[in-house]
Image (cartoon, coloured by chain):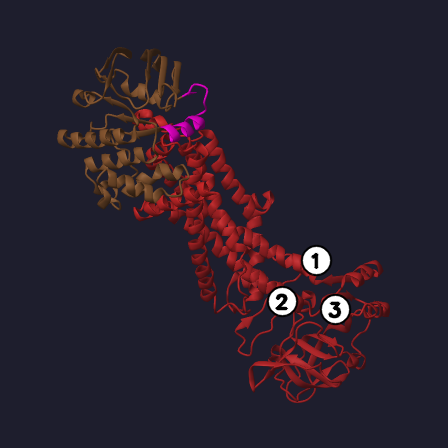
Chain colours: A red, B brown
């Protein structure tokens, strides 16, 4: 034990002296660069993922949704309630809406959502309130005879609170303007401006005739969805489908994870460049410490102790550089958030520590992948070198050293890419992934109108919920099974 | 205590020089008693340093055998020979071989720390005092003169309290006056500690301070002269 303590003390002493002499500058700078680049990407994507996870249930407005183009069998709701779950029915359909009185007779194709009293089960509807700039959380849903419309419909119709709207054969009163509605999933029906009404008013409109492309929905939420989910899957009828956060998340996560991998691979380019610097610095370190290693061997240090002495120094270098790199990465990702401040609309959670671990492992992998052969060579330096300086350099492992270095790089690439397929992705696949990432990113951020081709490209899956000034848009991420992949 | 501290029997070392074998040592045999002072003399290329390396277990002979005390070095692994050196041998080199990253005190502590000694700083400080460098403990080698560096090296060699001190041209890099001072320190400590001294030199004056002088020429032991007691 005291031997290890002595070796550690000696390692610290040698390290401190090398540090003061500037012997380690290149090595440490390379490792800091690697840890910082990998850490910055890791922290940023971790925060975005965190925001995504916390908002996933809000995107659905429930934990699970059963939908069909025909009314759902009542057994579904009964069974959910029997499992102690909360339920609410909703119907989404498109219809022309116009002012019931006044000057404008323009009819606007509108996305109508008729909901039961307990809607939404997750998240909340935010209404515009002049007294509250952030909006006011709605309690309940529109009363019978009333509707809530979004700002876009209000602008198109020139309607305001108190206006009367003609919806089918009904005339309903606007009682609130919606700022934000949590349920943004369901892109097929999300092309137009939106209107929220009480489900009990639907029959009187006489709009739901055969041929109308209505989506009948049962929203379900509760603690344990598994039993009901299993039951529902076994009892779904033709044309009915079940979506849950579990279904939703893989799609969103896959997109983000792909982006994470590509960003990670980009960071890895920096890490690979750092690897070159590490290799050069390690080679220089070997040359400059040969005499010290030979002297230690001469004074009776066995190979293992000599290796430990230098390996400890490298571990300390690696950990120290990792900490510095992580601190830079924390600042870097925050800088990224600040830089994108105008675009980010969601509050990003604090980053976890997993990216820090990744950054540390990257730095240590690079260090030992490229410095281990020289380290082993140091421990094998012949003690006779103290008498014969002309003995030359000890073998550094020859081709094995290259294999270890190449394996390290390959391992890091695979780790970032997660699978070989992504690593070898074609340019087209990369382009698609980046576009998908862009779309996802836009879901979490507000993008100023007029952002060019990408935004126009994404228009097919865009669900506008513009702010009052019309300057921001929100992109809905639509599961590919309903809307396809935007490319 | 064994009868001999060092024994060499038919020691030979041959290396390849291109395609041609080159014999550096050829059938060298001798024994050294505990506490003896032995100078190994010879011209450059006579095999002195090679012999020292073989006796210390730093190198392996092509043939023949070496014993340190009653341990034969031939059958030992690199690490076993290192362990034996740690217990038995102290070294002083022509080029001092101090670690530039360490202070004088830390250099002297090095063999003690490698051996796991708990009181390394105190012992190292004491040895530096004995070589007259008590005031230079925090100095780095480059801040010391050649003579001071060699005295630090002598303190380091003695700090592990070895049975044998092996010195390879210890005054070779020093001017005559400084060399004489360093030699004085070395012989004094050797006497005080009862250490066996094996001194490789081509300096006849220093060699004459040893009680025994082995002469090498072209790798062969050609002389073994002892002072008359």
Provide the residue designation for mark 2: A55
Q: Circle 1: is it few (<14), some (14-19), or many (20+) Cα within 10 Å?
A: few
Subunit of label 2: A
Q: Which mark is residue A222?
A: 3
Is residue A87 found inside the magenta-colored segment of the image?
A: no
- Using the image as rendered, state which of residue A414 and residue A148 is in the foreground: A414
Q: Which stretch is magenta?
A: B70-88
Closer mark to the observer between disc 1 and disc 2: 2
Provide the residue designation for mark 1: A481
A21 on left or right of A307: left
Total residue callouts: 3
Alpha carbon separation for disc pair 2 and 3: 16 Å
Query: Going 71% across and 69% down the picture, which residue do you hit?
Result: A62
Alpha carbon separation for disc pair 1 and 2: 21 Å
Subunit of label 3: A
Residue A137 in the image, given as x and y percentages of width and height: 63, 80
- Using the image as rendered, state which of residue A281 and residue A304 is in the foreground: A304
Subunit of label 1: A
Is residue B82 found inside the magenta-colored segment of the image?
A: yes
């Amino acid at each position: 034990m005291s031997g290890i303590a002595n070796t550690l003390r000696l390692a610290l002493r040698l390290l401190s002296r090398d540090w003061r002499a500037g012997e380690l500058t290149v090595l440490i700078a390379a490792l800091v660069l690697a840890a910082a680049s990998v850490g910055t990407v890791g922290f940023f994507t971790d925060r975005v993922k965190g925001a995504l996870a916390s908002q996933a249930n809000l995107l659905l407005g429930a934990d699970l949704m059963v939908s069909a183009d025909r009314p759902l069998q009542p057994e579904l709701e009964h069974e959910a309630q029997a499992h102690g779950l909360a339920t609410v029915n909703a119907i989404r359909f498109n219809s022309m809406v116009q002012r019931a009185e006044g000057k404008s007779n323009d009819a606007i194709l509108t996305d109508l959502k008729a909901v039961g009293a307990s809607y939404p089960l997750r998240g909340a509807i935010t209404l515009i309130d002049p007294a509250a700039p952030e909006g006011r959380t709605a309690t309940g849903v529109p009363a019978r005879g009333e509707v809530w419309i979004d700002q876009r419909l209000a602008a198109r119709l020139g309607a305001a609170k108190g206006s009367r709207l003609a919806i089918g054969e009904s005339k309903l009163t606007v009682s609130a303007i919606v700022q934000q509605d949590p349920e943004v999933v369901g892109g097929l029906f999300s092309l137009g401006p939106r209107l929220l009404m009480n489900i009990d008013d639907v029959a009187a409109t006489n709009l739901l005739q055969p041929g109308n492309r209505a989506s009948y929905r049962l929203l379900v939420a509760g603690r344990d969805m598994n039993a009901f989910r299993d039951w529902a899957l076994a009892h779904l009828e033709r044309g009915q489908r079940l979506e849950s956060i579990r279904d939703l998340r893989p799609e969103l996560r896959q997109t983000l994870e792909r982006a994470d991998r590509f960003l990670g691979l980009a960071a890895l380019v920096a890490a690979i460049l750092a690897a070159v610097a590490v290799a050069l610095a390690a080679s220089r370190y070997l040359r400059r410490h040969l005499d010290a290693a030979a002297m230690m061997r001469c004074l009776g240090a066995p190979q293992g102790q000599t290796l430990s002495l230098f390996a400890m120094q490298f571990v300390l270098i690696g950990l120290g550089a990792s900490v510095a790199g992580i601190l830079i990465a924390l600042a870097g990702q925050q800088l990224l958030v600040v830089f994108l401040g105008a675009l980010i609309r969601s509050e990003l959670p604090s980053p976890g520590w997993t990216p820090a671990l990744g950054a540390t492992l990257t730095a240590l992998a690079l260090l030992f992948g490229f410095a281990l052969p020289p380290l082993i060579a140091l421990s094998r330096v012949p003690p006779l070198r103290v008498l014969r300086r002309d003995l030359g350099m000890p073998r550094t492992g020859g081709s094995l050293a290259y294999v270890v270095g190449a394996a390290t790089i390959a391992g890091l690439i695979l780790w970032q890419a997660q699978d070989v397929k992504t690593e070898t992705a074609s340019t087209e696949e990369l382009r698609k992934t980046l576009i998908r990432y862009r779309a996802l990113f836009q879901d979490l951020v507000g993008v100023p109108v007029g952002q060019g081709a990408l935004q126009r490209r994404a228009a097919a899956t865009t669900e506008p919920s513009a702010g009052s000034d019309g300057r921001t848009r929100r992109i809905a991420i639509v599961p590919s099974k309903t809307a396809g992949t935007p490319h | 205590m064994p009868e001999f501290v060092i024994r060499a029997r038919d020691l030979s070392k041959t290396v390849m020089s291109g395609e041609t074998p080159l014999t550096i040592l050829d059938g060298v045999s001798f024994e050294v008693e505990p506490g003896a002072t032995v100078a190994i003399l010879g011209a450059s290329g006579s095999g002195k340093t090679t012999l020292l390396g073989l006796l210390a277990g730093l190198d392996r002979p092509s043939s023949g055998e070496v014993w340190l005390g009653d341990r034969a070095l031939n059958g030992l692994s690199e690490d076993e020979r290192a362990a034996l050196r740690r217990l038995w041998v102290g070294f002083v080199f022509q080029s001092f071989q101090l670690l530039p990253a360490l202070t004088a005190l830390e250099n002297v502590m090095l063999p003690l720390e490698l051996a796991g000694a708990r009181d390394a700083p105190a012992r190292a400080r004491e040895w530096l005092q004995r070589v007259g460098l008590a005031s230079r403990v925090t100095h780095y080698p480059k801040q010391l003169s050649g003579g001071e560096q060699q005295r630090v090296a002598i303190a380091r060699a003695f700090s592990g309290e070895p049975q044998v001190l092996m010195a390879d041209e210890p005054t070779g890099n020093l001017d005559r006056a400084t060399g004489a001072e360093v030699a004085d320190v070395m012989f004094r400590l050797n006497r005080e500690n009862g250490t066996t001294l094996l001194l490789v030199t081509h300096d006849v004056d220093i060699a004459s301070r040893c009680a025994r002088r082995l002469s090498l020429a072209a790798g062969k032991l050609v002389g073994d002269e002892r002072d008359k007691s």
